[in-house]
Image (tube, rainbow, N blue to C red):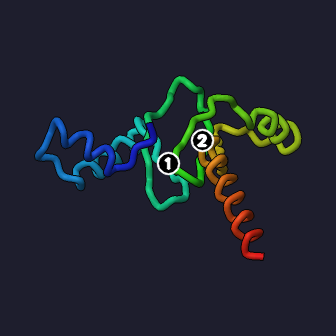
């Protein structure tokens, strides 16, 4: 899961009720510095954290972010492998890591948007 510090705090507080939010922030920062966690920014003003996948040889999964509900999915395929090969051959640039964030709408949110657009079109037609 891609958890915020506040979500981690709420989870930890269940088993350690005396813990403070500042302690959680400091611990997350420490774990990030130790390369145990990755700090992620999905451009929504909230940092999230996930376990660092060290078995992935420097390449990390990509994230699909729904603009409607804010849910985040992971895409395990290395979608930039071809680009990395081109960069290596043409520019002699060896890529060691990359991140890709894809923004859009999940199936449920897209359906909701289509239904709302249909209602608005119907209301506009009735107003004429």
**Mark carried by residue 40:** 1
Q: Please provide percent x and percent y for residue 23.
A: 22, 50
Q: Depth check: give the residue in front, 32 or 116.
A: 116
Q: Can you name the residue that lies furthest to the right here?
A: 90
Q: Which residue is mark 2?
A: 63
Q: Residue at x 71, y 57 (%)?
A: 118
Dot 2: few (<14), some (14–19), or many (≥20) neighbours within 10 Å? some
Helix, strand or loop status at disc 2:
strand
Q: Depth check: give the residue in front, 128 or 37.
A: 128
Q: Quadrant of the N terminus?
A: top left
* Spatial CA span between label 2 and label 1: 10 Å
Sequence-wise first label, 2 or 1: 1
Q: Please provide percent x and percent y for residue 103.
A: 65, 51
Disc nearest the viewer among 2 and 1: 2
Task: Give the quarter of the image for residue 120.
Answer: bottom right
In this picture, residue 125 sits left or right of residue 14: right
Task: Give the quarter of the image for residue 16.
Answer: top left
Q: Please provide percent x and percent y for residue 30.
A: 33, 45
Dot 1: few (<14), some (14–19), or many (≥20) neighbours within 10 Å? some
Q: Can you name the residue that lies furthest to the top here?
A: 55
Helix, strand or loop status at disc 1:
strand
Q: Depth check: give the residue in front, 65 or 128.
A: 128
- Is residue 128 depicted above or below 13 in this figure? below
Q: Residue at x 64, y 58 (%)?
A: 116
């Amino acid at each position: 899961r891609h958890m915020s510090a506040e979500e981690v705090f709420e989870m930890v507080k269940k088993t350690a009720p005396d813990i403070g939010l500042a302690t959680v922030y400091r611990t997350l920062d420490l774990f990030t510095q130790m390369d145990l966690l990755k700090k992620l920014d999905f451009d929504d003003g909230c940092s999230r954290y996930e376990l660092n996948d060290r078995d992935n040889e420097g390449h990390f999964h990509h994230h699909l972010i729904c603009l409607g509900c804010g849910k985040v999915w992971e895409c395990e395929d290395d979608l930039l492998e071809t680009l990395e090969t081109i960069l290596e051959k043409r520019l002699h640039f060896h890529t060691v890591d990359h991140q890709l964030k894809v923004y859009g709408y999940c199936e449920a949110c897209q359906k909701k948007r289509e239904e709302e657009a249909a209602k608005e079109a119907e209301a506009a037609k009735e107003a004429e």
